[in-house]
Image: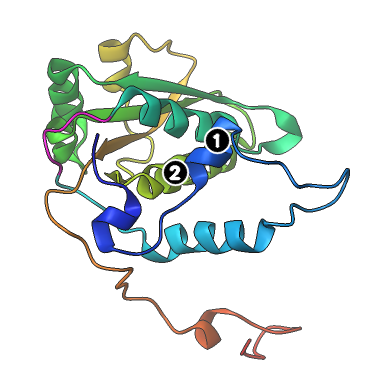
Amino acid sequence: MGPTLNQMWGDRPIAIKEAAEGSGTNNRPAGGPDINQKENAMEVFEAVRTALAIRNYKETSVPADVIRRIVEAGRLSGSAMNGQPWHFIVVDDRDTLRELGSVARTGPYVSQAPLAIVVAIQKTKFAVADASRAIQCMILTAWSEGVGSNWVGFFGLDDVKPILGIPNDIDVLAIIPFGYPPRAVGKGKKNRKPLFEVAHHGRFGHPFK
């Protein structure tokens, strides 16, 4: 079992595992919010705040229960009109991962990962937006379990199809490699524009403070 989020950088643990498995007490009134919603929201935000792109991985395998939660996070994502125009191909065979790395021009490090999920989509109007939501959910769920990842490719991955037997009428949107970081990572030390430059209050040009 690899390190969890709090083991990676010493913060309090993420409780997504409990939520995903349906364990614990459900204190949500009918039609109302969970009384523990504030704490859960803080945990989700912590994953968003600290998540970093990871391009190097330990050889340690990702446990089957963690893989299932990652894939479930994608499956449970929202989509336009509930179309769910996605397919998630879970790859953990080392030879296949090396093949994927050889055709992923922007992410040859896929070949070093112990796991990758190839995201393929139907050719529908909202498929890219829908699958992008699913990818982010999988990335954050993995991160909450101490597993790093990064988005590789954006279309232009037709060479993946014969490797994985993907039909020609399905597009390959991205490859997402997953694995445990080889060293401790920082606590969300990101180079981002300040909030007032990108967020507006009421109308464009009025900084949100």
Residue at image coords 15%, 42%: 57
Report the front residue among 142 and 171: 142
Residue sticking out furthest to the right: 30
Q: Is residue 56 left or right of residue 24?
A: left
**Disc 1 crowd, CA 10 A, few/some/many (<14, 14-19, 20+):** some
Quadrant where the image shows the C terminus: bottom right
Q: Residue at x 57, y 43 (%)?
A: 129
| Disc nearest the viewer among 2 and 1 | 1
For residue 204, above or below residue 68: below
Occupied quadrant, residue 102? top left
Instruction: Identify the disc placed on residue 20.
Output: 1
Quadrant in which residue 122 is drawn: top right
| Coordinates of residue 162 in the picture (x, y in percent) | 28, 11
Q: Earlier in the sequence, mark 2 or mark 1?
A: 1
Q: Amino acid at mark 2?
A: Thr
Q: How many marks?
A: 2
Q: Secondary structure at mark 1?
A: helix
Residue stretch in magenta: 57-62
Name the main secondary structure of what is drawn in magenta.
loop
For the N terminus, give its image quadrant: top left
Q: Could you tell me if the residues under marks 2 and 1 are in contact, i.e. CB atoms within 8 Å?
A: yes
Q: Nearer the viewer, residue 175 or 90?
A: 90
Q: Position of residue 203 (x, y in %)?
A: 74, 83
Task: Determine the secondary structure under disc 2.
Answer: helix
- The label on residue 141 is 2
